Image: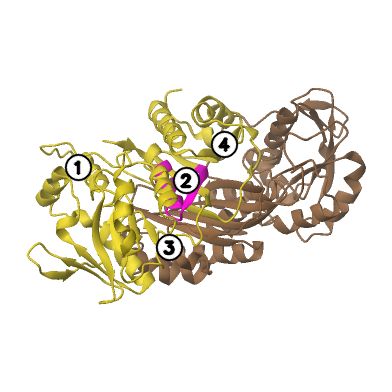
Chain colours: A yellow, B brown
Amino acid sequence: MDKVLLDYGSGGRASQRIINDLFFRHLGNDILARMDDAAVLSVKGPIAMSTDSFVVDPVFFPGGDIGSLAVHGTVNDVSMMGARPLFLTCGFILEEGLPMADLERIVASMGEAARKAGVRIVAGDTKVVPKGAADKIFINTAGIGEIRVDPAPSGHRAAVGDAVLISGSMGDHGLAILSTREGLSFDAPVVSDSASLAGMVSRLLEGLPDVHVLRDPTRGGLATTLNEIAGQSGVGIELTEDAIPVDPAVAGGCAVLGLDPLYLANEGKCICIVPGGDAEAALEILRSDPLGGKAAIVGRVVDDHPGKVAMITPLGGKRLLGMLEGEQLPRIC
Amino acid sequence: MDKVLLDYGSGGRASQRIINDLFFRHLGNDILARMDDAAVLSVKGPIAMSTDSFVVDPVFFPGGDIGSLAVHGTVNDVSMMGARPLFLTCGFILEEGLPMADLERIVASMGEAARKAGVRIVAGDTKVVPKGAADKIFINTAGIGEIRVDPAPSGHRAAVGDAVLISGSMGDHGLAILSTREGLSFDAPVVSDSASLAGMVSRLLEGLPDVHVLRDPTRGGLATTLNEIAGQSGVGIELTEDAIPVDPAVAGGCAVLGLDPLYLANEGKCICIVPGGDAEAALEILRSDPLGGKAAIVGRVVDDHPGKVAMITPLGGKRLLGMLEGEQLPRIC
C-alpha cells in the first residue's frame, strides 16, 4: 500500500503489519520488541520526565522534519534538568491517505535522531483518523532520563550575580519553518537548528556540576523563556543586545518580515545560567562542543526589576523585553 | 474568551494564562507547578512506561469522555505490567475554535480520573492548530509506574494449563462510542466501561503475585488481544463461548449492527491468565472488586494450535477466532 489506511490504526492485523514492517525496522530494540502493554525499564531515580506534541507544518523543512524534531524536543527538555535522557515513548496520529513514503521517511529520521541522542524508543501508539480530521501527521513524544546532579538545574535557581549564556544563534528554527511554509527565499539559506543537546549538557555538567538553570528557548523564543525564569526565580535579567548571536540570514529575514529573532523558536539551543565566576569556564565548554561554536555570554542576573528582562541596546539605552504576546507563528513545532 | 485561540499554543503570555487558569486548576500538584522543562520524580526501578494517543469521536459519550479515557488508557497499560501507576504526562492538540467550556469539562474530567486512579499529572504540553487541521481535541498521555512483582506479568508468560479470566463483560466501550456517534438508541442504554484498573490489579497481585499475563483488551477486543498473547507465548488458547459475559444491551446492539462484541474495544476490563490451580482464587479477588462483579473464567491455555485462539461453541463445535481484520470502528479511543 502506498498510503496510510484507516485500518492501520485498528489494533488488528493491519496494525501489526505496519508495526512490524515500518516501526520496528527503524525504531526497534529489545525493549520495544516485547510488545506488552508497557515497557519494563531499569532506572535509578531521581528521574526527569517530559512530553511534547509536534504539529509542525510543513513536516519536512531545511535541517530536519517532524520525526527528528519530535525526538530532539523531548530529549532536550529532559536534558535541561541535568538528566541523561534514556527512554522515549512516541504516539503517532496519522491522517488517512498520508503517503507511506512520507511516513517512512519520518520514522527513519526519528530512529536516526534517537540513536544519535543515545535514547531508545520503548513504547508507541498509532492512531489513524479519517481524511480531514488531522493534517498529515502529529507526533507526541514523552521521555525520561536519570538526573545526575544534585540539586538539578531549575528555572527557580537563577541568583543575583549569575551569568546568562546561550549556546548559539537565536531564531534559526522559527525562521526556517516560516520561510519554508510561505515559500520565501533569502540570500542565504535559513536552516533549522533542530538537534539533541544531550551531549553538550552532559559535558557541561561534567565540568561544572553547579549549573543553576538550563532551559531551551523553544516556543516564545529567548525573550519569553528568560521572562519565565526571571519570574520563577524572582530576579531581574539584563541582556546585552550586541552580545546575542543572530545568524545574518536570520536577521535579514526577520527584518523583511517584521519578526524579532528573540521571540522565534529554537530547537537545538540552550540557555545556561551559572555563577558569575563560572561564566568563562562554561563558555569554554559550550564552545568546544560541535553545537556550541557561537555560544556567548549574553547577560547577567540582577536585583533590579525582579521578574522582568531588560535589554541594554548598542547605544546604551535600556528597554524591557516582555513575553511573547499573541502568536507570531502557529505550528512552529 | 469562550473559544480556544491560536495564541493559547504560542508558548507566550496567552499560553501561561490557559496553563494557570485552566490546567493548573484541575490538574495541579506540587510537581507540575514547578514549570521546568521536565518534572523531577523520585521512583524506584524497575518501572513500566507506556503511551497512548486518544482521538475518540465523539469526545463526550455515555460513561466518560476523552479526558477520563486518556487517563484510564495509560493507567491501565502501566497496571498491566504489575506496576502501580504513579505519574502521567499529557499532551493536548486543540483545534482553534474549540469551545472553552468543552475543554474545561474534559480537563476537569482528567483531573478527577487521575485522582481516582492515584496518579499525578506531572508534565504537559498544549498545541493549538488552525481550524480544520485537527478535529476538536486529541490527547496523548504517557505514564510510568513502579513494578511490584518479579517477574512482571507479560504476554510472553502464558503457559499450558493456565486459566484465562476476564474481569467483566465485553464490548461495552466500543458499542457505546458507535451508538453515540451514529445516534442509535437501543432498548437499554449502552455505557462505556472506561475506568482505572489500578486498584483491581493491585488487589489481585497482593493475593496472587504469580499472575502470568495481564492485558487490557482495547482496540481489536478480546479476540485480537488473545491472539497476540497466543503468538507471544507460543501456546494455544481455548475459549468457552458460553462463559464470556456480554451485556444484553451490547449483545442486542451488536446483533442489529452486525458487530462481534469479542472484537470491540473495552476500556475498563482486563484479561488475566494464571496457573490453573489459582483460577478460583483469582476469580474471587476479581469479583470482590467494584469493577469485577461479572468476572469469569472463560478459557484455558492449551498445547494445541500454538499461536491461535479457538472457541468452543454452545453446541460443542470448535472454530478459530482470528485477529481483527480491517477496521470495525475508527476513532474508538
Q: Where does the N terminus of chain B fall, quadrant-wise?
A: bottom left
- Residue highlighted by disc 3: A154
Stretch of the chain drawn in magenta = A71-90
Q: Is residue B62 visible?
A: no
Q: Which residue is mark 1?
A: A179
Q: Where is residue B50 drawn, in percent x and y?
A: 59, 46
Q: Amino acid at mark 3?
A: Ser
Work out whether mark 1 precedes mark 3 in sequence or the reverse, and give the earlier one. Answer: 3
Q: Are marks 1 and 3 on the same chain?
A: yes
Secondary structure beneath label 3:
loop
Q: Residues within 10 Å of mark 1 (few under 14, many from 20)?
A: some
Where in the figure is residue A236, as x and y percent of width and height?
Answer: 28, 72
Amino acid identity at mark 4: Ser
What's under tag 2, amino acid-wise?
A: Thr
Q: Quadrant of residue A14?
A: top right
Q: Tell me which chain the residue with mark 2 is part of.
A: A
* Residue at the image position 60 percent from the left and 62 percent from the top: B114
What amino acid is at disc 1?
A: Ser
Query: Which is nearer the N-term, disc 4 or disc 1?
Result: 4
Give the mark, 2 or 1, whose residue is nearer the N terminus.
Answer: 2
The vertical placement of A139 against A29, above or below, is: below
